[in-house]
Image: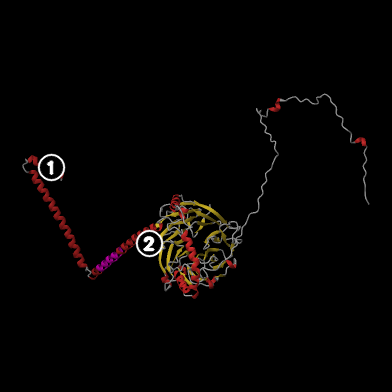
Amino acid sequence: MEIVHVYTKKRSDFGRPCNFSDRPAELRVDICPDPSLGEPFLERDPCDVPLQCSQDMSEHEVNTDRYESVSCGINHVEGGWPKDIYPHEMEQTIRFRKKVEKDEHYCNTVLQLGSVMEHCIKQNNAIDIYEEYFEDQDSVEDMQECPSAKTINIFRDPNKVKRTVTSMSWQPGGCRKLAVAYSCLDFQKATKDMSFDSYIWDIENPNKPEMCIKPVAPLVCLEYIPTDSHILAGGCYNGQIAYWDTRKGSQPVDTSKIEHSHRDPVYKIIWLPSKTGTDVFSASTDGQVLWWDTRKISEPTEKLILDLNKEGNLDNALGAISLEFESTMPTKFMVGTEQGMVVSCNRKAKTPAEKIVSTYSGHQGPIYALQRNPFFPKNFLTVGDWTARIWSEDIKDASIMSTKYQMSYLSDACWSPVRPSVFASVKMDGTLDLWDILFKQNDPTLSLKVCDEALYSLRMQENGRFLSCGSQLGNTTLLEISPGLCILQRNEKSLMFERETKREKILEARQRELRLKERSRSEQSKDEDAGAAREGDGEETPEEMIARAEAEFFEVIDAELRKKEKEEEKQRCVGATLFKGVSSRGRKSVERRALELL
């Protein structure tokens, strides 16, 4: 049923037209001025009132979505050295070349490629497309440029709970990627929601890590194998060893068993050159150095306990916190300990006791960094307490060079891979120091404040141009160094070589002198012992000792009496000379005066 309401109204009540007419103005209200109302106000003369004729506009901001790039690549495996050949091992490469040259197809292949190669050589002889003009002027400009470093990127830990950057490793080859290990080293301060993940970063994309590495425990150290850009090995906080193949995903390929692993965090792991490319060794503060084969990583292949008493007692072992290995010295390696001592070892020794060769002591705290000079392997760099020291392998008593004691604790250091006289160090106050010992030894060539928090780790790229620093809050800062600090200067190697040769000669002469002194001292002590033995064979009786003492006593008495007689005779001669030709009265005055003088 539809309900309708009807409203009615007269036409005369609405819609009446308006009639306007002219009439004079009339006053409705007259308000007189009141001066009291103006007392609380100040008079402005003149009074400016701005007016804006344009429309009122409001400003709005819009933030677009962040652009995230993802890099994709193809792995090309054709050509190059075989997987079982280590390119830096000269014996393996020579053996492989001889094997290839004996192949039947080798000569035919060389003859086929000869014409193509000849064409390329003729092109190169016609014009050198890589010729550098004004090379001398460029080097002069580089030398005159002030040392500097600028920040390129900062890679931040993507987790809510920030962790310390404990280790970094550059990818071999292109050096476009950086593997970073994150861990909390404060004992029992790790929270339950803290992540175990570490990451691989593309240095051109700081927004998102390229790959996530998922270990069984927080990673303390991480290292790429020099011959493959996809394989990494790492040491965990719980002492286990694991390795990854990035082509197979984020999970480790294999992990060592906990009962055969280290008992403390693994602070350093290094790949060893071998035919298989699967050998690594690790060091930990539990006092052990363990060797592993990644093909069977469940348990170590070899073990060394850092007991200086050479008894193999783990309770007396020194805690290892840094490790160094040089491929040109395949049997030697060095270990930096918590006690401030560097232990030099020989892996090929017959017994475990003979593996510990010598020690170098000079630091007052743990040695956080230990690295040989890439150009002069006999010299190595250590960092501990408030100083960085450079040592010679032949001199074990003291370092050949030391920096001043810094105001803040040093946490890491490394040599430049392209300049033999340049090394870098980081401190707990967030400062990066670059040293050039060829030109200045007392102070760093460049000191840069990287961040406000402590810096814990440091790593240089292969070309020496880029340097990465890891901080306590999980920030990895990538810096570019000025060309003056990363380009090999003219005659630098020869200058360093001459300097080091002179230093070695001086040190050898000093060592020879010390050995001769020690030998003469030992011979003298032997002679004294022999004399004492001879005296011991003919011992005196008590009567002989009394007689000898009496004789010495009477000799002293006789000497004193003779001395007294000589003095009296001298006085008599003087008196006789004075009294000669003098009266009795004058003689008495002379005697009185002589007595006064005497």
Q: Is residue 318 visible?
A: yes
Please identify the quarter of the rendering in which residue 373 is found: bottom left
Q: Which residue is mark 1?
A: 592
Residue found at x 52% / y 54%: 479
Please identify the quarter of the rendering in which residue 206 is found: bottom right
Q: How many marks?
A: 2
Q: Position of residue 223 (x, y in %)?
A: 52, 64
Along the viewing direction, whichever of 187 and 169 lies nearer the viewer: 169
Amino acid identity at mark 1: Arg
Mark 2 surroundings within 10 Å by alpha-carbon count, few (fewer than 14), some (14 through 19), many (20 or more): few
Residue found at x 12% / y 50%: 568
Q: Which residue is mark 2?
A: 397
Q: Which residues are magenta?
A: 517-532
Along the viewing direction, whichever of 445 and 230 lies nearer the viewer: 230
Of the numbered discs 1 and 2, the one sitting upstream in the chain is 2
State how the image is colored. secondary structure
Identify whether 489 is placed above or below 238. Answer: above
Q: Position of residue 222 (x, y in %)?
A: 53, 64
